[in-house]
Image (cartoon, grey):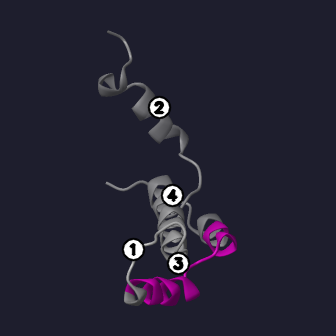
Amino acid sequence: MTMPDERYHSLKRTEEFLTRLLNPKLTPNVPKPIRSEAKLLLRHFPTEFYLEELAAARPDILSPRMDELHKWIISNDPANSTDS
């Protein structure tokens, strides 16, 4: 199940990825049609402002921060233990 904070950060990382695709110095071997598609997608991609607005309106769907229950579950999951 995708958590609201995971969804938020996925959108942020997607925006960063598409932005990197536009920069030939960062991604020199990307074909022009891919750069063009990235540019078109970013044209209407939600900015930080809109992500924050969405998160404020629907924190159950989108949230920049992990909720307390999710933090507690992760911190108490034996799979995440650093004990040897």
Residue that badge 3 annotates: 22
In primary-sequence order, the first of circles 4 and 1 is: 4
Q: CA distance from mark 1 to mark 2?
A: 43 Å
Give the structural element (helix, strand or loop) at label 1: loop
Query: What percent of the width, then of the height, locates residue 53?
Result: 66, 71
- Disc 4 crowd rating (10 Å Cα; few below 14, some 14-19, many 20+) is some
Q: Which residue in the structure is indicated by mark 2?
A: 72
Q: CA distance from mark 1 to mark 3?
A: 11 Å
Residue at x 38% of width, y 83% of height: 31
Q: Is residue 84 visible?
A: yes
The one of 7 and 76 positioned closer to us in this rendering: 7
Residue 77: percent from the left, percent from the top? 35, 27
Choose between 45 and 26: the one closer to the eye: 26
Check contact, mark 2 vs mark 4: CB within 8 A: no
Q: Which mark is residue 29?
A: 1
State the CA–CA distance, disc 4 to disc 3: 20 Å
Q: Which residues are magenta?
A: 34-52
Query: Which one is earlier in the sequence, the residue at label 1 or at label 3?
Result: 3
Using the image as rendered, state which of residue 30 and residue 66 is in the foreground.
Answer: 30
Amino acid type at mark 2: Trp
